[in-house]
């Protein structure tokens, strides 16, 4: 378990790649030894299934970083400012369910950390002067719908054919680029986009968690 937690950009993979199957495994693989002080990945244990996160899975996790959600000012346009993370305050997420806890480790080169599409995760803060190198890899069933944002005209870069792009409701789709999406907060005639705080309020999420802080250590 992580103590004295500092964690950045807490989010779930679903908001970035949720147009295909949700039966997708996310893998983080360090290309070098990554001790805690170099900022390895950390995951919020239980955040994919604990009841305290149910409302969040019905709202934030259904939001699409490119195309917004049902509360967007303009359907099909993401009008929430920022790059997508739910919060950079890890204590806010711990407040949703008492059984949740942040987990990380001292990783060695070639280790694999695997987690689901609904698992909140982020990175510990790198307090060293060195860069840490890692890769992200995703796996899904071969016959499952593919998020067409991560397909190049339905083919792998090496030219080997892969499953063609499909919509969220299944069925093959023509291999064509995704429709153009206006830049967030810059759509003509719209006011600047909502903040994530405003979106949380509209989703009915408890705002008292936003300012949650680390509890004092026992004496």
Image (cartoon, helix red, strand yellow):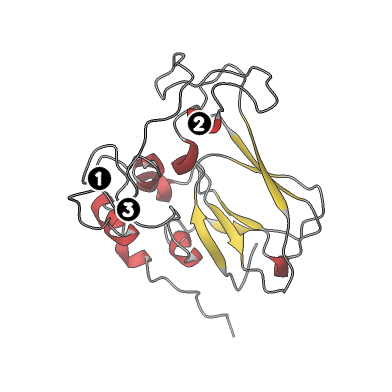
Mark 1 vs mark 2: in front: 1
Mark 2 vs mark 3: in front: 3
Q: CA distance from mark 2 to mark 3?
A: 23 Å
Residue 93 or 15: which is nearer the viewer?
Answer: 15
Q: Give the mark, 1 or 3, whose residue is nearer the N terminus.
A: 1
Residue 165 % position (x, y): 50, 21
Q: Secondary structure at mark 1?
A: loop
Q: Which residue is mark 2?
A: 22
**Dot 3: within a 10 Å radius of its alpha carbon, few (fewer than 14), some, or many (20 or more) residues?**
many
Q: Which residue is mark 3?
A: 80
Residue 184 or 9: which is nearer the viewer?
Answer: 184
**Dot 1: within a 10 Å radius of its alpha carbon, few (fewer than 14), some, or many (20 or more) residues?**
some
Residue 67 or 108: which is nearer the viewer?
Answer: 67
Residue occupying the point 36% across, 42% down: 63
Quarter of the figure with residue 199: bottom left
Do residues under tags 1 and 2 come within 8 Å of each other at their CB atoms?
no
Q: Which residue is mark 1?
A: 72
Residue occupying the point 24% across, 44% down: 71
Quick check: 200 above or below 182? below
Seen in the image, is 106 located left or right of residue 192? right
Mark carried by residue 188: none
Q: CA distance from mark 1 to mark 2?
A: 23 Å
Do residues under tags 1 and 3 come within 8 Å of each other at their CB atoms?
yes
Q: Secondary structure at mark 3?
A: loop
Q: Secondary structure at mark 2?
A: loop
Residue 38 % position (x, y): 71, 66
The N terminus, quarter of image: bottom right
């Amino acid at each position: 378990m992580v103590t004295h937690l500092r964690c950045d950009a807490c989010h779930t993979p679903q908001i970035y790649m949720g147009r295909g199957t949700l039966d997708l495994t996310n893998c983080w693989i360090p290309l070098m030894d990554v001790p805690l002080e170099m900022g390895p990945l950390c995951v919020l244990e239980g955040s994919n299934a604990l009841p305290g996160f149910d409302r969040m899975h019905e709202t934030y996790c259904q939001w699409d970083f490119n195309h917004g959600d049902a509360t967007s000012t303009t359907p099909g346009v993401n009008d929430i400012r920022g790059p997508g993370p739910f919060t950079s305050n890890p204590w806010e997420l711990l407040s949703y369910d008492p059984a949740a806890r942040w987990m990380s480790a001292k990783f060695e080169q070639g280790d694999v950390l695997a987690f689901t599409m609904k698992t909140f995760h982020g990175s510990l803060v790198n307090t060293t002067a060195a860069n840490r190198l890692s890769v992200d890899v995703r796996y899904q069933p071969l016959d499952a719908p593919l998020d067409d944002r991560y397909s190049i005209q339905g083919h792998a870069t090496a030219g080997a054919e892969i499953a063609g792009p499909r919509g969220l409701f299944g069925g093959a789709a023509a291999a064509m680029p995704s429709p153009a999406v206006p830049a967030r907060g810059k759509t003509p005639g719209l006011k600047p986009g909502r903040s994530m705080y405003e979106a949380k309020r509209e989703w009915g999420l408890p705002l008292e968690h936003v300012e949650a802080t680390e509890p004092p250590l026992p004496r």
